[in-house]
Image: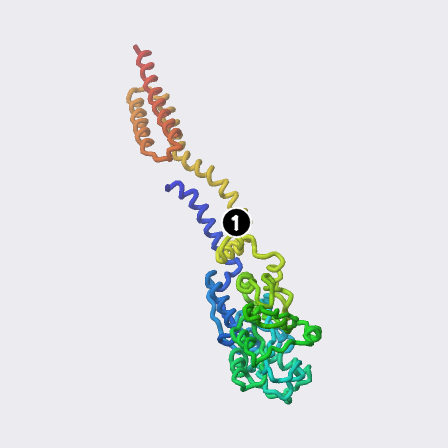
Amino acid sequence: MRDFLRVYGVLIAVVLIALLVAMRFMAPAPPKSIVFAGGAEGGAYAANADAYSTRLKEQGVAVEVLTSEGSVANLDLLKSGRADVGIVQTGLADDLGAEGLRSLGAIYFEPMWVFLRSDLGVGDLSDLAGLKIAIGPEGAGGRVLATSLLEEAGVGSTTYEPVPLAGAQAAEALERGDIDAAVIVSGPSADWVRRLIADPAIRLMPMSRGRAIVRRHPHLDEVTLFAGVVDLADDLPREDVVLIAPSAQLVVREALHPALQALLIETAFGVNGGGTLLSDPGRFPDPKLVDIPLSDEAERYYQNGPTFLRRIFPFAVANFLERAWVLAIPLLTLLFPLVRAAPPLYRWRIRRKIYVWYRDLRALETEGRAATTPAERNAVREKLAELQGETGEVEVPLSYTDDLYRLRAHISFVAALVDKLAAENKHARV
């Protein structure tokens, strides 16, 4: 073992030092925790943030979910660096800016619902003038969209009474009769959507000029809520309803580690890829329905899918191997000659322990041949006996014992030679 360590220990030490030096130049590992800007409690953004948090935790990434008023607030959290990832409604970036941010793709349609009392003779956005309308709180993307479209339809902010309610709160206010209408941007899975559609005192207004609105706003899409899709038994809604919808997109800080960006897109396929009441399975995530430029990692992912290693290994293992593979070539270049040189060096060190005795053996043979008296020959025989004993204490691996026994046989041969010469000299004197 000592001989093994003397030879291969150098190789092992070189490899360990090379690894330590190389790891200093490896790409940094992704952080093990991120901050996710969700939305108001009970809303679609918050539900999606919680779903992402659960799946990311399974991959070893902890997620802190922040509540907010909505997309505008999420943009502010992302730009200020207080959040790493968030859900943002399309259509806001041009006005509010998205410096230092990148999109990972749209994750679902987020239609604008216009619910109003059934007794109102309202057929279009322009008919909402003079009414008390819930358009969402400050900081919500729905409020920005509702205000913009109402103004385009000729309903200025001074011609109606805005109420800062959204989601379930706006729905409850409409059910109580506290407001006349609610313009709400939200996903179709919210409980209050089904409740309002089923209420005979409330009507969901179709967007009769939806196609024109979509042409004017590229970040919007025209979607159809098919008859019976909300509740087939009760036939809700009772007829197809055309809606306009921005998309909810997953936005990250540009500096977020690429491996985490890829993991977020992978998670989006799991959370948002199953389809909704407004989209077929596989429709999302979508790299096209965004208004913030895609990150480089997102473009690579949508083009090529997950990396080869990620298809085989868990996230943490795959990421380490992907960061380490760039070191393989220089390490192999270093290791190849070392590995090739180590076995011959090891063999030389072991055999040197044996062959070093041959120098003494040659000297004793020469001395034995030159001896002329019994005393000189006896001295040589004693030295040969000592040499035989010393070589018997030499330890070598089993695979090299033949060399050791060959040495001991040669010592015996020289001892026999000395005895033979002594007998011949004795016979010659007689």
Count the marks: 1
Report the side of 426 relative to 232 (left or right): left
Residue 289 drawn at (x, y percent): 64, 68
Amino acid type shown at disc 1: Leu
Q: Residue at x 53, y 61 (%)?
A: 270
Residue closer to the observer: 26 or 298: 298
Q: Residue at x 33, y 17 (%)?
A: 420
Quadrant of residue 174 within the rendered picture = bottom right
Residue at x-position 30% and y-position 30%:
389
- Viewer-nearest residue: 48 or 16: 48
Corner quadrant of residue 157: bottom right
- Would you say residue 37 is visible in this rendering? no
293 on left or right of 329: right
Q: Whole-percent x and y of residue 4? A: 40, 41
Residue 102 position by quadrant: bottom right
Q: Pick the quarter of the image with the N terminus.
A: top left
Q: Is residue 318 above or below residue 129?
A: above
Mark 1 packing: few (<14 Cα in 10 Å), some, or many (20+)?
A: some
Relative to 152, residue 245 above or below: above
| Residue pointed to by mark 1 | 331
Along the line of sight, the residue nearer the viewer: 232 or 124: 232
